[in-house]
Image (cartoon, grey):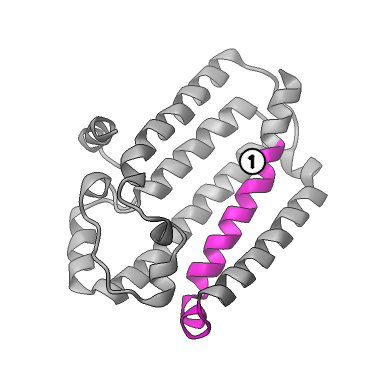
Amino acid sequence: MDEVRFAMALFVTLLLPAILTFWLVIHGGIAVWRSTGVPVAFTVASIMMGLAISTAWYWRGELIGRDLGFNPWLTTAGAILYCATIVLSRPIRRHLSLRTFAGVPEIEQEAGDLIVVGPYTVVRHPRYTMVMAGIVGWCMVCNFLGTYLLGLASLAGFYGIAWLEEKELVTRFGRAYEDYQSRVPRLLPDLPGLKRLYLMG
């Protein structure tokens, strides 16, 4: 069990910096990528992801940190939370194409339609909500001090990515997105909204 938990901790230690780096590069440099194009944006983002993974691998021992031991209650709760995010991600995937998931419409400034149906009636960024909940569940199963700290940093990172994305969405959709912002919470659903999200799955 300890070897499995360590492998899970190593996986998330390498994956989270890579994912955060990709989206921070894409959304943080959106003005540049609109003039250079998708291939350049993805090339730079991929290189930065590689550097993030290499850095995380070099410092993996420090990043994973102290083993807090196997806790069956914590493991069970974390596994339930993580599995719940898989169920809740189904209605999200039905509303996102691969192009949208990869951020291509933002870079190419496609007109498109503002998605305000399905899970997007519950929170404005259901994909990030599910990812963040999944991170918490995964860290609970691993139960290493460093993964908790990395998880907290990742939650802050995804909040920042959502903020950057919303700046771009306001530019693309204007008043329509501002009205949407006033009606629907950014990341944290209320209990009725959470129930609706489960029913959609």
Residue placed furthest toward the top? 72
User: Where's residue 62, x and y in %?
Assistant: 78, 43
Direction from residue 130 to residue 75 in the image, left or right: right
Direction from residue 129 to residue 4 in the image, left or right: right
Per the picture, the main secondary structure of the magenta-coloured stretch is helix
- Residue on which disc 1 sits: 12
Identify which residue is drawn at 63% across, 55% down. 18
User: Where's residue 117, x and y in %?
Assistant: 20, 50
User: Where's residue 29, x and y in %?
Assistant: 52, 75
Residue 26: say if magenta. yes
Depth order, front residue of 55/99: 99
Direction from residue 118 to residue 167 in the image, left or right: right
Identify which residue is drawn at 28% across, 48% down. 123
Residues shaded magenta = 10-37
Residue 90: say if magenta. no
Q: Picture quarter containing residue 85?
A: top left
